[in-house]
Image (cartoon, rainbow, N blue to C red):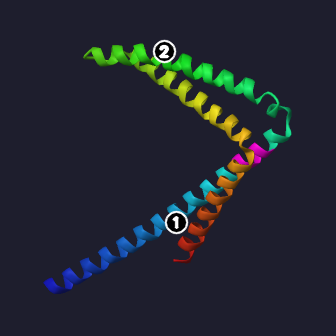
């Protein structure tokens, strides 16, 4: 009876593991397909920006985002130092740190986007390579 119980527990455990593996594989394929979709949208956005008048103003926008990055970095330093130097974190310091970090991250992201516009051919090539790898991985994972 003990052997039968152990056998049933082993079989149930195997089915649970197989079910979890199948769910994880579906999640992984879905994640890869979402990455492919995001890259394709970014590629379309880059193509639309290139054909618009934004390309002519690229250097001005890039300069604005660099200045915004420097300002946000300058605001982050005292906030970070005050948080590190005190034992407790006040709500205002925490909110300030989060807001200026978000501003810094977004300004660096937009700076990179306008830099990509200047290197349009290289950016599209990198996106194509990345899309190819993701599509190959999605097909390989779907066939398993």
Rendered-image quadrant of the N terminus: bottom left
Mark on residue 26? 1
Quadrant of the rendered image containing residue 15: bottom left
Quadrant of the rendered image containing residue 57: top right
User: Pointer 2: residues within 10 angstroms few (<14), some, or many (20+)?
Assistant: some
Give coordinates of residue 143: x percent, y percent: 56, 77
Please name the predominant secondary structure of the magenta segment in the image.
Answer: helix
Any magenta on residue 43? yes
Mark on residue 75? 2
Closer mark to the observer between disc 1 and disc 2: 2
Give coordinates of residue 132: x percent, y percent: 64, 64
Horizontal side, residue 69 vs residue 7: left or right: right
The residue under the point 61% across, 55% down is 34
In front of the other: 69 or 3: 69
Any magenta on residue 1? no
Quadrant of the rendered image containing residue 110: top right
Between marks 1 and 2, how big is the CA–CA gap?
43 Å
Q: Residue furthest left?
A: 2
Q: Is residue 120 above or below residue 26?
A: above
Dot 1: what SS? helix
**Which badge, 1 or 2, comes first in the chain's sequence?**
1
Write down the region rendered in magenta. 42-47
């Amino acid at each position: 009876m003990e052997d039968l119980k152990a056998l049933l527990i082993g079989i149930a455990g195997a089915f649970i593991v197989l079910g979890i593996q199948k769910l994880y594989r579906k999640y992984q394929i879905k994640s890869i397909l979402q990455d492919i979709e995001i890259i394709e949208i970014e590629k379309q956005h880059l193509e639309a920006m290139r054909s618009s008048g934004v390309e002519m103003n690229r250097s001005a926008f890039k300069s604005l985002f660099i200045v915004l990055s420097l300002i946000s970095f300058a605001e982050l330093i005292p906030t970070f130092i005050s948080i590190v130097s005190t034992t407790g974190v006040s709500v205002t310091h925490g909110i300030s740190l989060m807001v200026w970090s978000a501003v810094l991250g977004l300004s660096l992201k937009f700076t990179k986007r306008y830099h990509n516009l200047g290197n349009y051919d290289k950016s599209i090539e990198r996106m194509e390579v990345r899309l190819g790898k993701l599509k190959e991985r999605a097909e390989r994972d779907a066939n398993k």
